[in-house]
Image (cartoon, coloured by chain):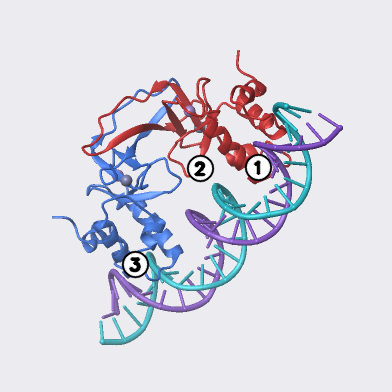
Chain colours: A red, B blue, C purple, D cyan
Amino acid sequence: MPASALDILVQHSLRKTTVRMQVLDIFLQAKEALSHNDIELHFNQLDRITLYRTLKTFEEKGVIHKAIDGSEKLKYALCSGHCSEHAHEDHHAHFHCDHCGKTICIESMHIPAVQAPVGFQLSGAYRVLKGTCAACS
Amino acid sequence: MPASALDILVQHSLRKTTVRMQVLDIFLQAKEALSHNDIELHFNQLDRITLYRTLKTFEEKGVIHKAIDGSEKLKYALCSGHCSEHAHEDHHAHFHCDHCGKTICIESMHIPAVQAPVGFQLSGAYRVLKGTCAACS
DNA sequence: TGTTTTATGCAACATTGTTTCATTTAGCAA
DNA sequence: TTGCTAAATGAAACAATGTTGCATAAAACA
Ligand SMILES: [Mn+2]
Ligand SMILES: [Mn+2]
Ligand SMILES: [Zn+2]
Ligand SMILES: [Zn+2]
């Protein structure tokens, strides 16, 4: 069964606050990666700055990860369970729909190891697919 | 020998203007992908809006391509010659340095074909490597 | 319950990008 | 070379996104 918002906060030693619980619930129900604005739209009233800080904290603590999609908008998605402040492990591809703009985690598509160019040191890699998503096809 | 700024404008049927010539010269000398701000810093005075439009036009006509690097900043680099309004062909990886923030085209690293997830239609893909660049190592 | 630490709300500011419109310039033809 | 026309530029106004500093409120804990 999926973790609850409270479980996630406890697991990552984060204080239980109204904003955090609500934001986590939104992520738990989402089928795609969410931008700052996507989340804001779920609220009647919410301080923008608090949301920025909430997302930053979640990202730092391994609750959510950035979903790189080649668009100008930064989006986040829930981490898959074993991430922490010290070890993010979201080595999967992301799909970005040209049509609806949604960004979807492709958990099944692993990011292959690559050879670094001469003189370069690698610390990670992203993989982005673009095209038309299942819903838009 | 590398194309000159004027050659590039003529090749893409673009009017020769002072701004365009100067911007192209900056790209021709650059060793990394450039953000709007990077370019602005090369000028004593330059209208921001004109630069936005110049970059947009160049991108549409196949003169430059977006260098997706997972950072919040949009960067561009010169296309490698055979791109046009109708066919961009910049299927290479980009390296983003965690240390200096520079983004470098890795022309030698091709982006492999991938299998689309069920129900999805692919139109392209990005590949981003991150780590420490040769200069920062 | 009271104390300490952390999160929130608000103001002010910075950066990035778009749209509209008047003016200037490039390319072209007379 | 001159004048015309289409395109590019410059300026203003606006929108979206993100950051910092500080006072207040709330959570955790003894
Ligand atoms: Mn993901
Ligand atoms: Mn490139
Ligand atoms: Zn779609
Ligand atoms: Zn570097």
Residue B19's mark? 3
Residue type pointed to by label 3: Val
Q: CA distance from mark 3 to mark 1?
A: 42 Å
Res B15 seen here: no
B90 and B61: which is toward the camera = B90
Marked residue nearer the N-terminal end (2 or 1): 1
**Number of marks drawn:** 3
Label 2: chain letter: A
Q: Quadrant of residue B58?
A: bottom left
Residue most extreme to the top: A1
Q: Are marks 2 and 3 in contact (CB under 8 Å)?
A: no
Q: Which quarter of the rendering shows the N terminus of chain A? A: top right
Quarter of the rendered structure image containing ligand 2? top left
Percent position of residue B67, x then y: 35, 45
Q: CA distance from mark 2 to mark 3?
A: 29 Å
Left or right of B9: which side holds C5?
right
What residue is drawn where x is 32% and y is 40%?
B132
Q: Are marks 3 and 1 in contact (CB under 8 Å)?
A: no
Q: Are marks 3 and 1 on the same chain?
A: no
Q: Quadrant of residue B71?
A: top left
Q: Which secondary structure lies at badge 1?
A: helix
Nearer to us of marks 3 and 1 is 1
Residue A50's mark? 1
B83 and B112: which is toward the camera = B112
Q: Which secondary structure lies at badge 3?
A: helix
The residue wearing badge 2 is A73
Label 1: chain letter: A
Nearer to us of marks 2 and 3 is 2
